[in-house]
Image (tube, rainbow, N blue to C red):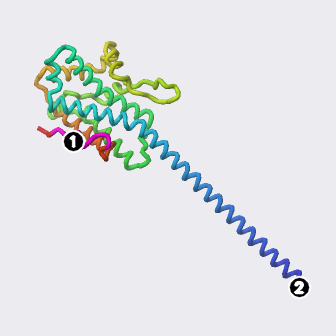
Amino acid sequence: MKLEVVTAIIAAIVAVVSAVISIYGQARIAQLTDRLMKQREAESREAQTASLMSKYRDPLLRSAIDLQSRLYNIHQNKFLERFYQESPSAQNYALYNTLYVVAEYFGWVEILRGEIQFLDLGDLERNRRLSELLASINQAFGRYGRHTLGSNFRLFNGEQRAIGEIMAVPRSNSEVIGYDCIGYATFVKKMSDPEFAGWFTKLRDDVDAIGNQSAVDLKRIVLIHSRLIDLIDFLDPHCVRVPPQHRTRIEQQ
């Protein structure tokens, strides 16, 4: 075979091999680029999720802590009876502040429902567990069972959501999109509005009945309190914000 032919064949083979290597390299680079983009998107979603949950976990946790603390004191330390026996101002505080801690919890749950519709924690199991815990508290408030749980502190799902809705207000900082829950002073002021206060009529009667030492059944309070502790355990598993001694469950009578 002539040298020129051999040279041409070798050149052709080299060209084909180079083309194959080039195509493989380009495909490999494309795969790596696509994988890197997906990884960055996943990291970005995780960062956004962490930021959202950091923003809303703490107020939800705080409201759950305040509510469980009040329910514990009502049941174990006769908070309402003691304050109702003092001055009218003490009675008003006990009434309005108790209504507020209930309403604030519903407010943050409703804000979560609206702004993080699927409560995405970046983990399907954690998503499911958080949804279950919130639903369990919702059910504890609304569960039928007049003869087993009594009717005190019973609020149906629609009432819970309505209270949460009227407690949520757009953030005053226009640069930050979202909602906040109204503060206690604003809440007390709004209670002079019959339309606003009307949503609390049933709960207010229940608080008054307990404060006036009427014969009331507090089993529902025990159930709600226990499920709030479950939520606190989930949101603060390492007891960073709430020490273990402040998670004491009320013993069933």
- Tell me what residue is drawn at x 29 percent, y 24 percent: 100
Binning the other alpha carbons within 10 Å of mark 1 as few (below 14), some (14 to 19) or many (20 upward) gives few
245 within the magenta span? yes
Position in image of residue 57 (x %, y %): 38, 38
Position of the C terminus, as image quadrant, is top left
Looking at the image, is mark 1 or mark 2 earlier in the sequence?
A: 2
- Tell me what residue is drawn at x 31 percent, y 12 percent: 192
68 within the magenta span? no
**Near-viewer residue (183 or 224):** 183
Q: CA distance from mark 1 to mark 2?
A: 94 Å
Query: Which quadrant would residue 199 be assigned to in this image?
Result: top left
- Identify which amino acid the numbered label 1 is placed on: Gln
Position in image of residue 76 (x %, y %): 15, 32
Q: Is residue 40 left or right of residue 57?
A: right
- Identify which amino acid the numbered label 2 is placed on: Lys
The secondary structure making up most of the magenta span is loop
Residue tagged 2? 2
**Near-viewer residue (109 or 175):** 175
Query: Which quadrant would residue 230 be assigned to in this image?
Result: top left
SS assignment at label 2: loop
Q: Nearer the viewer, mark 1 or mark 2?
A: 1
Binning the other alpha carbons within 10 Å of mark 2 as few (below 14), some (14 to 19) or many (20 upward) gives few
- Tell me what residue is drawn at x 29 percent, y 27 percent: 101
Position in image of residue 184 (x %, y %): 33, 22
Q: Is residue 63 above or below residue 19?
A: above
Residue tagged 1? 245
Q: Which residues, given as a range, are shown in magenta?
A: 240-250
| Residues under numbered marks 1 and 2 in contact, where contact means CB atoms less than 8 Å apart | no
Q: Is residue 120 above or below residue 88?
A: below
Q: Is residue 251 visible?
A: yes
Position of the N terminus, as image quadrant, is bottom right
